[in-house]
Image (spheres, helix red, strand yellow):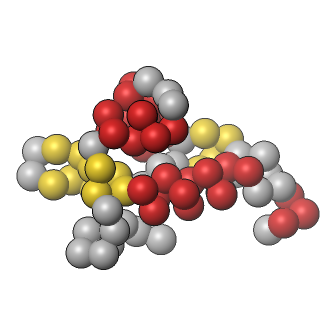
Amino acid sequence: MAIDALIESLITPEEAAKIADVHPKTIRNWTTVGVIARNGQRVWLEDIRVGVFCRTSREALDRFFVRCTKRRDEE
């Protein structure tokens, strides 16, 4: 699912990092490189460009964490 900028709460990578309690570089890595989820699939944190800036959303963080923690038997 893509971020809907008209509905979702857009946040900066720095704000996302505070919410997730990680370094802002980790947020950038999640959007570009992704992570291997528990089910073995690579997942990425959704982001969008707003002008020259990248933004994600609180809702995208929620979706990302759900996808990261899904096990093979939950697909």
- Residue 42, position in %: x, y? 63, 47
Question: Is residue 40 visible in the rendered structure shown here?
Answer: no
- Residue 41, position in %: x, y? 70, 51
Question: Is residue 23 visible in the rendered structure shown here?
Answer: yes
Q: Residue at x 26, y 69 (%)?
A: 5
Camera-side residue of 48 and 41: 48
User: Could you say which quadrant of the image residue 12 lies in?
Assistant: top left
Q: Residue at x 16, y 44 (%)?
A: 53
User: Could you say which quadrant of the image residue 14 lies in?
Assistant: top left
- Residue 66, position in %: x, y? 66, 57
In the image, residue 15 above or below residue 56: above
- Is 69 on the left-hand or right-hand side of 8? right
In the image, residue 62 above or below residue 33: below
- Is 55 on the left-hand or right-hand side of 33? left
User: Could you say which quadrant of the image residue 25 lies in?
Assistant: top left
Q: Residue at x 67, y 41 (%)?
A: 36
- Residue 30, position in %: x, y? 48, 39
Number of marks in picture: 0
**Location of the C terminus (image quadrant):** bottom right
Q: Residue at x 45, y 62 (%)?
A: 59
- Is 10 on the left-hand or right-hand side of 73? left
